[in-house]
Amino acid sequence: MDWHQHLGFLLDDVAYLYTRRFEERTQGVSLTLTQCKALAVLANCEGVNQKRLADISEIDPGRLVRILDRMEAVGWAQRRSDPHDRRAHALAITESGRPVVQRIWHVVRETNSEALTGLATNELHLLTELLERVHANLLALEPLAAEPAYRGGAADAAAGA
């Protein structure tokens, strides 16, 4: 079996190739796939706070803060005072951000069309269902206990590792 046929490696390769193609299409607006995801999810969930957006979008909270800072700086998103929690901000897409979100969805459709060429409708539904189940399985896992760092080298070779 070739190394790229192992599930984890194959998923990584597909994600890398998809991201590369997607980002080729978004060069005009200089956005990464993760930035596009944050903006698209925000457009669908306006009024959420940063913590909730991080949860929904599955983007690391620290990374999301930087993305939101950039989106706010270019005028595509804004933080508004949350009327229910003075410590939090409700997030929103601005009018100038709406065309960018439309462009993102256009890029999603184009990239998906290329990536899924040759798949029948029933195969596409099955692929989506199976990936959603794998996603749910991985989300449900408890973190593993930290293991000692791998040292590699002669000690492992001598031990038959």
Image (cartoon, rainbow, N blue to C red):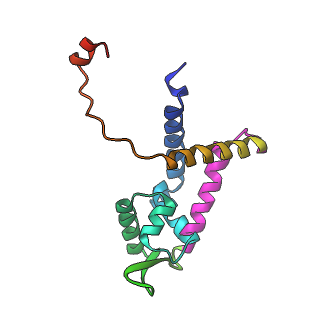
Q: Residue at x 42, y 70 (%)?
A: 50
Question: Tag count in the figure?
Answer: 0
From the image, which quarter does the C terminus lie in?
A: top left
Give coordinates of residue 66: x percent, y percent.
35, 64
Q: Residue at x 52, y 43 (%)?
A: 15
Q: What residue occupies the far left of the structure in this picture?
A: 155
Q: Quadrant of residue 67?
A: bottom left
Tell me if residue 141 comes above or below residue 51 in the rendering.
above
Tell me if residue 160 comes above or below residue 16 in the rendering.
above
Give coordinates of residue 110: x percent, y percent.
64, 52
Q: Is any atom of residue 136 visible in this view?
A: yes
Q: Residue at x 51, y 57 (%)?
A: 26
Q: Between residues 23 and 65, which one lies in front from this camera angle? A: 65
Q: Quadrant of residue 159?
A: top left
- Answer whether residue 127 is magenta in the image: no
What is the chief secondary structure element of the magenta stretch?
helix
- Answer whether residue 118 is magenta in the image: yes
Q: Quadrant of residue 153?
A: top left
Give coordinates of residue 52: x percent, y percent.
47, 68
From the image, which quarter does the N terminus lie in?
A: top right
Q: Residue at x 23, y 27 (%)?
A: 151
Tell me if residue 39 comes above or below residue 148 in the rendering.
below
Q: Which residues are magenta?
A: 98-121
Tell me if residue 4 comes above or below residue 72 in the rendering.
above
Q: Is any atom of residue 29 visible in this view?
A: no
In the shown orientation, is residue 128 left or right of residue 48?
A: right
In the shown orientation, is residue 8 left or right of residue 115?
A: left
